[in-house]
Amino acid sequence: MAKDTIDLRQDSKYDFILNKTADLSASLTCQYYSGTTVDTLTDFSFSAYTGGSLIVKQNYRSNTAILEFDTLDGSMVLSTGNTFQLIKSSTELANLPIGEFEYTMWLRNASMSHRAFLSGKFIIQYKIV
């Protein structure tokens, strides 16, 4: 997955498409519009957060995760700036089911254990490249 920009001025629902036969190393840039009369594109800052997680489930009500990314295990990396990375090897992805799932991304710091950040569809494909 190439470096992409996530525009946070919308409802922060974005879909991810994952090829389970390749290594995942995605770097995503987050920005939003601020201002009252003239909108100014502003970089989101992850500097106030100590960690985060992105959890993929069959649907939001499911108890079992299909795939997890977390800063604690290094599969998610938050920059001090406006980017985050998702990292998994093709070996870690090989046994994933193919289909359309749902994810939620949470951020955390000393005062918040779960701040909802992004959500949407997480589509896992089998694609030979």
Image: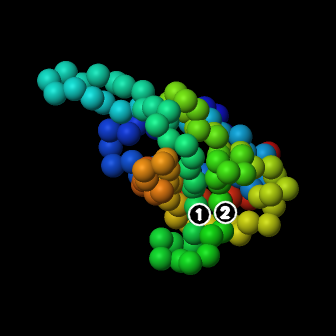
Mark 2 Cα-neighbour bin, 10 Å: few <14, some 14–19, many ≥20: some
Rounded to the nearest angstrom, the CA distance separating label 2 from label 1 is 5 Å
In this rendered view, identify the residue nearer to me: 112 or 22.
Answer: 112
Please report contact status of discs 2 and 1: CB closer than 8 Å, yes or no: yes
Q: Is residue 40 above or below residue 102?
A: above
Residue drawn at x 50%, y 41% as measured from the top left: 49
Q: Is residue 59 above or below residue 78?
A: below
Say whether residue 24 is left or right of residue 29: right
Amino acid at the residue labelled 1 = Val
Looking at the rendered structure, the secondary structure element under dot 1 is: strand
Quadrant of the rendering where the C terminus is positioned = top right
Say whether residue 99 is left or right of residue 20: left
In this rendered view, identify the residue nearer to me: 126 or 69.
Answer: 69
Q: Kindly identify which numbered label has been placed on residue 82.
A: none
Residue drawn at x 57%, y 69% as measured from the top left: 57
Q: Position of residue 12 (x, y in %)?
A: 39, 48
Q: Kindly identify which numbered label has been placed on residue 56.
A: 1
Quadrant of the rendering where the N terminus is positioned = top right
Residue drawn at x 77%, y 58% as measured from the top left: 93
Q: Position of residue 114 (x, y in %)?
A: 46, 57
Amino acid at the residue labelled 2 = Leu
Do we see residue 4 in this rendering? no
Residue drawn at x 57%, y 73% as measured from the top left: 58
Q: Kindly identify which numbered label has been placed on residue 67.
A: 2
Looking at this rendering, what residue extends furthest in the left direction?
Answer: 37
In this rendered view, identify the residue nearer to me: 98 or 111.
Answer: 111
Say whether residue 72 is left or right of residue 50: right
Q: Is residue 28 above or below residue 13?
A: above
Mark 1 Cα-neighbour bin, 10 Å: few <14, some 14–19, many ≥20: many
Q: Position of residue 39 (x, y in %)?
A: 24, 25
Q: Position of residue 38 (x, y in %)?
A: 19, 21
The mark nearer the N terminus, 2 or 1, is: 1
